[in-house]
Image (cartoon, coloured by chain):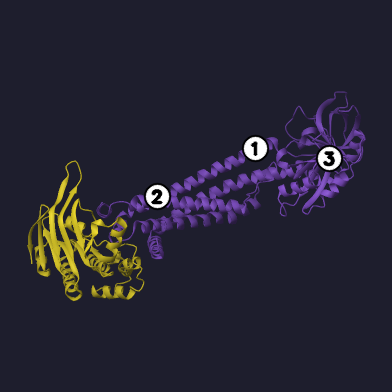
Amino acid sequence: MNATDIKTAFFIAYKTIIKGHKSTVALIVFILSLSFFNLMFVSGFLSGFSDGIMRSMVDTSTAHIIVMPQEEPTRKDFIPEQKSVRAQIQTIPGIVATSSHYQLGGSISYDRENNGKIKSVSAPIIGVTQSEEKDVLMVQENMVSGEFPDNLIKDEIILGANLAGGFGTKQTTDLGGAKVGDKVQINYANGITRTYTVKGIFKVTIGGIGGTAFVSAKEAEAVLSTYDNASEIMVRVDLAKNTLDEYIQRIETIFPELKVEKYTVRLSTVGILVSAFDIIALIVSAISILVAAITIFVMIYVNAVSKRRQIGILKAIGIKESIIELSYIIQSLFYAIWGVIFGLGIIFWLVIPFLALRPILMPFGNASLVYTSVGIFINISSLIISGILAGFIPAKIVAREDILKSIWG
Amino acid sequence: MIKVKNLVKTYPGKVPTLALKDVSLEIAKGEFVALMGRSGSGKSTLLHQLGLLDIPTTGNVVINNIDVLALSDAKRTRFRLQHLGYVFQEYALIAEFTAFENVYFPAMALGDYKAKERTAYFLDIVGLGDRMDHYPSEMSGGEQQRVAIARALINNPKVLFADEPTANLDTVSSEIIFKLFQKLNKELRQTILVVTHEPEDKKYVDRVVWLKDGKIIEDVT
């Protein structure tokens, strides 16, 4: 196929579109724009859902990177000299903030009516320095009662709503409605018993953090009889500067003895949910592309069959089959490109502004459509490639017909 | 110009139809020949085989010293574009193209982008110089057929084939078309092979080949 053939094919396609029924052209473009909108909306919405869940996990539970104590050759309970470790980690360009956690286990007891009917539940307890923690995890932004002060004092505790109870479905694992100002008692795993005043209650529905309690790092050190250690160091990074793997590699280079993990390993059931959404998005996208391809196929086939005589005439005067096929591919491309343009227009000029005005509230915040340039490129390419194939096949079928049969039927 | 030898065309089916029976024929350059005969005599079938619109079952067709049946599909298509011109019974114009575009298009497909002057020239010859921008739907049958003739001539074909070009036209339009063929034949030495069933068309041509039941029964100069 040479330049003349391509020019000839363009000429046929151009004239066919220009002189074709405007309403037919508009209908094809409209259907394709809806197909593309469907492809973009569903994939964007599910991506937004996954992204929101991940973001919620990173912001409230896991940060981006978790540094844990040495496991080989011998497993240790703590990272020693955590302040120094964190200071070194923070020298890595792109690290936003770090904080240390003490992990304690224990049984929390609450006497709601002060009548001796005590309810006890097991819960993870985390010792934090909130003035550092607030730059890494944003639990303080999810308070439903009281506050999470920077200087949480020795006998104060922050409870997750799922642990405190009274902020949603009643669970056997909650305290039955502990409120700010109430007293709770913790029997730590090492036998120490302490009483705390509830200073604040936070509500996070994604992940298990909602069933956790926070005490101050100093209190945790007192309970554990230790100092300047950490059960884990949480690291928040700027992903625009480096990839997560690059940050992990840098940390591992400085501290080869420590175990460094990215947040995804802590997603557990949330991770399964996100993977399920990704699979659903993939299936819905594939169906949308298939629907778009079938639409183009049917439209081009009907168009080609109705132009059978014209195709026969073109062949009779010496126009190559490949030129005729290309002209139909160009027509498909025209429809697909306009479908993409209108589909993008609906998404970016209608749906996104509409969602900004009337947001859909999800457990992790407002639902949003999330797109990456690669994702958009893949969606556009998918529709255009399927359009080319869907245009080529019917054109090939009709163009292969015998000349006389095409002209006279 | 055209040499046809022992041409046989059988249409397959439950009962195969023998449409052409051992037809042999020679047409010289510049001749204006009419293929005549009753309906079903094989005249259109013969024209289709000579014009490479169909492939004969057996036999030889040589046009301009080229064994055209030995050419590949792609080369036969190119040969049609470059060396043969067609005028069909039902005008066979592209509805989406103007008269000018219908005529210019085969030249464009050949890569001859300077054919615009020639397009205007041929449209003038067929008397449609003032209807260039009109679409087929805006023209009468006679006018459409004249556009088809101009289109058939645009690539300076070795042979112009016309399959009952006046079958759908009134007497006046038919006369215009045949006089146009005559003019092209005389002035441009255009070789023309026309299928017609109207006996009075004989007056325009140099030679009449009569067919009956797929065989040439008379060849009158």
Give the left or right position of residue B80, taking residue A215 as reference: left
Residue B25, compared with residue A202, is above or below; it is: below
| Gap between marks 1 and 3 measured at Cα | 27 Å
Mark 1: amino acid: Leu
| Gap between marks 2 and 3 measured at Cα | 62 Å
Q: Chain of mark 2?
A: A
Give the left or right position of residue B160, taking residue A395 as reference: left
Q: Are marks 1 and 3 in contact (CB under 8 Å)?
A: no
Mark 2: amino acid: Ile
| Gap between marks 2 and 1 measured at Cα | 39 Å
Instruction: Name the residue tied to disc 1.
Output: A273
**Which quarter shows the N terminus of chain A?**
bottom left
Q: Number of labelled discs?
A: 3
Instruction: Name the residue tied to disc 2.
Output: A393
Circle 2 or circle 1, nearest the eye: 2
Query: Which colour represents chain B?
Result: yellow
Q: Is residue A137 visible?
A: no
x and y, in percent, of residue A342 in the image: 52, 56
Q: Nearer the viewer, residue A402 or A332?
A: A402
Instruction: Name the residue tied to disc 3.
Output: A101
**Which residue is at 59% across, 55% downward?**
A348
Quick one: label 1, few (<14), some, or many (20+) residues within 10 Å? some
Q: Are marks 2 and 1 on the same chain?
A: yes
Q: What is the secondary structure assignment of the residue under circle 3?
A: strand
